[in-house]
């Protein structure tokens, strides 16, 4: 081994072994939840927000006509990597309607947009970091597999922008955005299982999707038990 | 303790910090383009939860429950644990090769 200009051979070997040992200290890494991978916002974040931006995308305001599509109850939690719920985080979702149109002036199929579908919703998490939406099961459209876009914000900061995919959906494998999320683990972390609601009169689903963001919770909050 | 000795040890500390701290402080990972699946990546990200360090990851060790579906798909023998071999078999079943379709652009 050549002499290092700053360190002796013995010191280099010790530094290397210490570095290697630190990298494989398992406790530091294994106790954390994996962060939800980010993904592109895409071009269809609403260019004009609807008057109604609540968490029920199926019914607009006081309308009695629901949107077309299979009802989905989307729930989950926004968490830190140590499992603490993040309070007062704003979760936004946006997606196509049953005809594949976004709430955006540049969306394809705009002339067929379902005027009863809100297209965009917001929900502020509680102390446990919980959020919930009522929306329609996303559908595929040319170039994309079914998905729901989301953002997590806190104050004026966007903590995460990404997308939720359907576990086991065959068209996921051909979707360039899904493939670009990362490897098998990353793709798993952006998928949610859509489960049928038993005994529902019409197709109705539940999907649970926890979001892990790498932020420090407000001071005074103790990490929660997992 | 001489100044020279201190300088050398501070240099070593920075080297160790660069190798260990910076990767773990990585910001929320962004979209990856054109990056293929990696078996080593899959194994390392799963086996990091193997607290017993015996090469047999149990569901109880996998504290990130969002990965339990992946665990179940890997545990084809229904042993209640998965090994590197199980993950390699899963990798060969689920890796994505070839091209996907491109997303639409704004009109």
Image (cartoon, coloured by chain):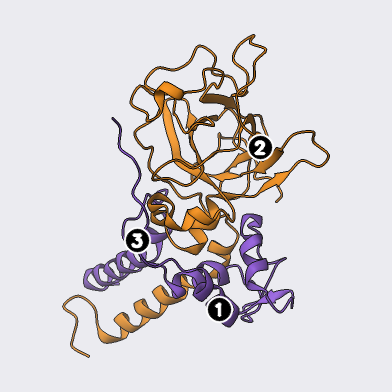
Chain letter of the residue beneath label 1 in the structure image? B
Lower position in the chain sequence, tag 1 or tag 3: 1
- Whether A26 is drawn above or below A89: the answer is below
- Residue A134 position within the rendered picture, expressed as x and y whole percent measured from the top left: 65, 29
Most foreground residue, B65 or B95:
B95
Q: Label 3 vs label 2: CA separation?
A: 32 Å
Q: Mark number for residue B99? A: 3
**Badge 2 is on which residue?**
A75
- Residue A3 position within the rendered picture, expressed as x and y whole percent measured from the top left: 18, 86
Q: Residue at x 45, y 40 (%)?
A: A141
Closer mark to the observer between disc 1 and disc 2: 1
Q: Mark number for residue B89? A: 1
Which chain is depicted purple? B
- Disc 1 crowd, CA 10 A, few/some/many (<14, 14-19, 20+): some
Please identify the quadrant where the N terminus of chain A is shown.
bottom left
Which chain is depicted orange? A
Secondary element type, mark 2: strand
């Amino acid at each position: 081994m050549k002499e290092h200009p700053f360190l002796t051979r013995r010191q280099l070997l010790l530094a290397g072994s210490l570095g290697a040992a630190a990298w494989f200290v398992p406790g530091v890494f294994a106790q954390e939840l994996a962060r939800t991978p980010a993904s592109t916002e895409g071009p269809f974040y609403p260019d004009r927000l609807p008057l109604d931006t609540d968490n029920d995308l199926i019914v607009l305001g006081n309308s009695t006509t629901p949107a077309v599509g299979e009802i989905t109850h989307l729930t989950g939690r926004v968490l830190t990597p140590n499992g603490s719920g993040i309070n007062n985080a704003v979760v936004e979702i946006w997606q196509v309607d049953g005809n594949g149109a976004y709430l955006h002036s540049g969306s394809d199929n705009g002339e067929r947009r379902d005027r009863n579908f809100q297209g965009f919703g917001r929900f502020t998490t509680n102390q446990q970091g919980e959020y919930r939406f009522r929306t329609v099961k996303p559908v595929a459209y040319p170039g994309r597999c079914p998905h729901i876009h989301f953002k997590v914000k806190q104050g004026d900061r966007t903590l995460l922008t990404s997308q939720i995919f359907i576990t086991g959906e065959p068209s996921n494998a051909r979707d360039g955005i899904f493939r670009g999320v990362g490897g098998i683990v990353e793709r798993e972390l952006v998928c949610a299982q859509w489960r049928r609601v038993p005994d529902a009169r019409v197709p109705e689903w539940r999907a649970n999707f926890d979001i892990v963001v790498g932020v420090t919770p407000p001071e005074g909050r103790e990490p929660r038990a997992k | 303790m001489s100044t020279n000795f201190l300088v050398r040890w501070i240099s070593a500390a920075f080297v160790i910090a660069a190798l260990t701290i910076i990767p773990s402080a990585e910001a929320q990972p962004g979209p990856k383009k054109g990056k293929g699946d990696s078996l080593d990546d899959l194994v390392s990200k799963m086996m990091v939860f193997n607290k017993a360090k015996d090469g047999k990851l149990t569901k109880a060790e996998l504290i990130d429950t969002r990965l339990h579906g992946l665990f179940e798909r890997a545990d084809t023998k229904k042993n209640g644990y998965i090994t590197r071999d199980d993950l390699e078999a899963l990798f060969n079943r689920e890796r994505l090769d070839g091209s996907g379709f491109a997303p639409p652009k704004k009109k």
